[in-house]
Image (cartoon, coloured by chain):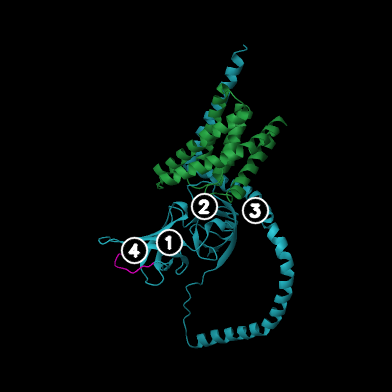
Amino acid sequence: MIGYHPYHKKRKSYTLAIIIVLLAVLLSFSTFRDLFGLRSMLQAAIYPFQSAAVSIWKGAVGLPSSLAAYRKGAKENAELKKELVALQPKLTLLDELLRENSRLRALLFYKQRNPYRFRLLAAQVIGKSPEPWFRILEVNQGRGAGVRMDMPVMAKEGLLGRVVEVSKFSSKVMLITDVESSIAAVDARSQDFGLVKGGSLDKLSMKYVDAGGDIREGDRIVTSNISTLFPPGIPIGEVSLASKKEHDLFYHVEIKPVVDFSKIEEVFIIF
Amino acid sequence: MHLLMLVLYALLVIVLQSVVFARLNIFGVSPDLVLVSVISFAILEKRERATLFAAGSGFMQDLLSFGAYLHTITRVAVSSLVGILKEGFLGNEYSMAALFVVFFTPLILIIEGGWHALFGGRPLDLMHLASTIFVATLYNLILVPIIFPILKKLCHA
């Protein structure tokens, strides 16, 4: 009887582990992985804790600089107020000029061709994928704010990625440095076309650039107008290496991204 | 440890992992707070509780992950293996935790990386894998003297 008890307990724990593993397999690789909508609800339940932790973290990290900036800020504030008063008449004049401009355009039947007519939704980074295999960010805007799958996301410097998963209050954004990312892009100077692909260690490369083209180091790479996901003209990076051998069909191009992916805290989702 | 305390600890670990430790990465590698906690918990607690903690925290980690959800399975497997192996281990608990972290961190990374390469179609750069294993193991090892005493106190409480 004495020996039976631990054996019984051990067997029970093995059974528990096996049941849990089987359940995990079922949830991970089957069609039930969404848990009939429960996964999204659980993600929404974790969101407030993540949001609070981000606020605490930012407060703690920014405290020393905040104290230093406080004294400087008071002085700047007074100066800026003076400048604002001086700028007010100019703004009124500009408003008037803008109205006049649009009125005249309408009169001239001028068709406004604005490729940047998209709306931007500001979002804060609340989490980053801890796995080294993926380049994923979690942001605090979700289905509730109108975010949908595949929406482009940018930082103030340039293109960041696209939305790959949406829950009620948050979304996951796949960065352009992820190995699965592929973007139609052009050289802003020569208009040579290629596909910008992600790689390990936040590297970008541009594939299928015709060897007959003219791509040079230092050239700016922007999104192409043939892309179905991204609006044209958004900066991606700068060519850091462009080389080709005699019989190569394509250039070997490496790109330095304009965005510093390790320091992103604010992003903009493009509608 | 009380069940509620266990859930709260798991939640805290997950939030810290995704918010704080993800920002403290070195070469894109952040420490795996969950794995260190699962190993420590498997050493300190009974097998059933350790398995439940591993499953719960792994599931929460999967919720915040992308791609194939491997964390629940791998964490439960690690917890069960530690539960079996600890019985034959001679030495103190700290060295046991450190040894298991050194053993399981590379193993988990190889399994996950291999899985994503084989079934997810993601190219696996061996240099990247090697550097990731090195940094992650070192990072996790640093966490052992911090996490283990906290969990030990919580378990005794």
Identify the mark nearer the N-term, 2 or 1: 2
Do we see residue A226 in this rendering?
A: no
Picture disc at residue B11: none
Identify the chain drawn in cyan. Answer: A
Identify the chain drawn in green. Answer: B
Identify the mark nearer the N-term, 2 or 3: 3
Pointer 2 indicates a residue of which chain?
A: A
Tell me how far mark 3 sits from mark 4, CA to CA.
41 Å
Residue tagged 4: A209
Residue tagged 3: A54
Q: Quadrant of residue B60?
A: top right
Identify the mark nearer the N-term, 1 or 3: 3
Residue tagged 1: A255
Pointer 4 indicates a residue of which chain?
A: A
Q: Are marks 1 and 4 in contact (CB under 8 Å)?
A: no
The correct choice, above or below, for B88 with respect to A264 in the image is: above
Picture disc at residue A136: 2
